[in-house]
Amino acid sequence: MTLEPPAAGTGRNDVPAAPDWRDELSAGRFGSAHRAYLVSGGHDTAVRSTLSALSDVEALVRAKAWHRATKRLAQIEERPPLVPWSRLQGDLERLRRSGDALDRRRPDDAVAELDALESGLFEAEAQTQRGTALIYDDRVDDAERCFQQALEADPRHFRALTNLGNIALEQGRVDEAIAAYERALALNDTFANAHHNLAVAYRRKGQLGKSVHHLRRAQRLMQRNDADDARARLGSLAGGRRLPTLRWLMYAAAAIVLYLLLKSRGVL
């Protein structure tokens, strides 16, 4: 992989210079690094591929898709020395464990994982999770600062935005909450939590039509997510060559059920 120099500026004082993609990369702003490289006219296909993959990893981390993020990171073949790859991989696993601890309402375990982060390249996600841990400890003001810091590191972090909306909603700042949820959904319209909480906020405003719309959208997304999770778990249990065997076992079970049903009705 050739690390190309940034493109020369236009010389126009009224147009801000595009960021150096290498600065963005070393700071962990992977999506921004990818965009900056494309804007600079970079043409090295290996660089483009690596930056695109890291941008995907960043997006998957925002969505808490830990296994997919780990798989995408492992697919990167060209690895420039600007990125501490081993620490990056370790931090991704720590964030997964921290996220799992938060899902189990164990904030102390989550904070321990966050304190062990080494690369500093997932700052937005780390601050978002730290803020969530503080919420569990009823430290709302500190949590709000964490979510703000997450957005400073990554303005596209829709979960941090949603969490700010949640705090505003709990404190009765309904219009501010609605604005935060709508911004989050502008970044990711498939985030079920934002739709659900926006429905709650609209109901408090008396706007029942909008509330029902977002509630139904949230329910459909949650059902789809549950189905996706079930398929992922089935695939994990099946494991490659075991999948055909599992499929035939399912067919056999269905045939037995059908046989018993027909027999109970006197057909057989």
Image: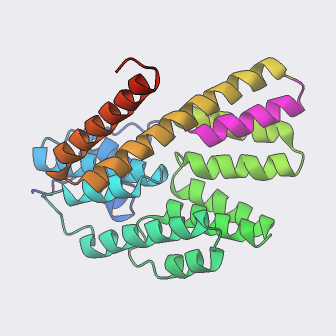
Q: Nearer the viewer, residue 118 or 94?
A: 94
Residue in view at x 27 percent, y 72 percent: 84
Q: Is residue 112 visible?
A: yes
**Does the magenta portion include 147?**
no
In this image, 187 relative to 206: left or right?
Answer: left
Looking at the picture, the colour scheme in use is rainbow
Q: Is residue 108 above or below residue 219?
A: below
Residue in view at x 43 percent, y 73 percent: 94
The x and y percentages for residue 77 are 13, 58
User: Quadrant of residue 87 in the image?
Assistant: bottom left
Quadrant the N terminus occupies: bottom left
The x and y percentages for residue 193 are 64, 42
Q: Please report the bounds of the magenta region as a residue range.
A: 191-206
Residue in view at x 45 percent, y 38 percent: 227
The x and y percentages for residue 137 are 76, 73
Q: Main secondary structure of the magenta part?
A: helix
Q: Is residue 85 above or below residue 221?
A: below
Q: Nearer the viewer, residue 201 or 97?
A: 97
In this image, 187 relative to 131: left or right?
Answer: left
Q: Nearer the viewer, residue 119 or 224?
A: 224
Q: Nearer the viewer, residue 127 or 259?
A: 259
Q: Is residue 19 visible?
A: no
